[in-house]
Image: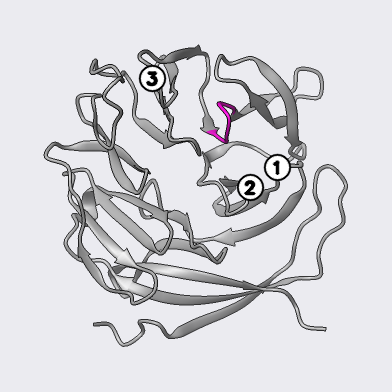
Amino acid sequence: MNSRINVVIAVLVVAFLWSAEGSHAQEGLSIKKETVAVIRGVDEERLLGLRAEGDRVLVADERGAVRAVSLTSGEVSPGPSSKNEIIDFSIRNGKPVFLTSTGNLSGSVQPSWPETPFNACILETAEDGGLFINGGPAAFFLLPTATSPFRISGLDLGIPVKDGFLWTLTRQKTLRTWQVELLDCLGNRMKRVYRFSREFQPEGLYFGPLGPEGELLVSNFSGKSRFLTLIAQNGRMLWRIPAPAPICRRDLGWAPSGDLLLLERVDGKVCLRRWVFAAPEG
């Protein structure tokens, strides 16, 4: 096993940036980076990414192969895999749920849910166990007890929060700035949550996963640099930090402690890394 596992190899200090809503920048943030485990047994060229729940992380590839990683011990073991190739996956009620290459759902699904395929490539699990399926001509919201999904047209990006609501990205018509809005499961606009600065452009934009307290994690590029932004449910920007370019679509996750998890390539190997945040002393 790589000698760098569980060894801190980098400490950096990044400054909090000004929020577009005018909240004050923080003094700074210390980030300690640790390697949790080297991931073996997945196809690195077809890596989908990670999903985290509790102290367990699942890493999957497009073949449907899954590896489970313990955040406590760093042990990597075979996880519950898919019999079919997959284009996305999530965790629902502690078990993986898969969106197969044919658009079907498998794994942790409700018996009442329809078995017909979805024209989609993105799968998200809501807090109540419902599913949000997106990436095609329309998005679909499957509530836990539903027999058919709610269909939402014209939704390019979204992530479920709780109680059947979604966060999405829209553009303000007058100011032409980008903003995060709250929608219900029918696609009706409820309120604006956050407005980005005029300089913000949704290049390489990705939402999620939600933070430990339901915060929205936003990944995007500014020029050639990638940044991660964390937005609280009340619309306050908590931090914005630089991050390495993703090695797969779902390279981000959260530990129960609030540490950020990333899949990164270290010395040519795919590693699960933990970013430990610490407030500045004094």
* Residue at 68% across, 18% down: 189
* Residue at 36% across, 61% down: 56
Picture coordinates of residue 112 (x, y %)? 30, 20
For discs 3 and 1, the disc positioned in front in the rendered view: 1
Disc 1 target residue: 233
Picture coordinates of residue 124 (x, y %)? 42, 36
Q: Secondary structure at mark 1?
A: loop
Disc 2 target residue: 215
- Please tell me which of labels 2 and 1 falls first in the chain: 2
Q: Distance of mark 2 from mark 3, alpha carbons?
A: 26 Å
Picture coordinates of residue 237 (x, y %)? 74, 49
* Residue at 35% across, 81% down: 5
Q: Is residue 162 magenta?
A: yes
Q: Is residue 26 visible?
A: yes
Q: Dominant secondary structure of the magenta stretch?
A: loop
The numbered dot on residue 136 is: 3
- Chain part drawn in magenta: 160-165
Report the amino acid beneath label 1: Gln
Foreground residue among 188 and 220: 188
Q: Distance of mark 2 from mark 1, alpha carbons?
A: 6 Å
Q: Distance of mark 3 from mark 1, alpha carbons?
A: 27 Å
Q: Quadrant of the C terminus?
A: bottom right
Q: Quadrant of the N terminus?
A: bottom left
Q: Secondary structure at mark 3?
A: loop
Crowding at mark 1 (Cα within 10 Å: few <14, some 14-19, many 20+):
some
Tags 2 and 1 touching, CB below 8 Å:
yes
Q: Secondary structure at mark 2?
A: loop
Tags 3 and 1 touching, CB below 8 Å:
no
Report the amino acid beneath label 2: Glu
Report which quarter residue 79 is drawn in. bottom left
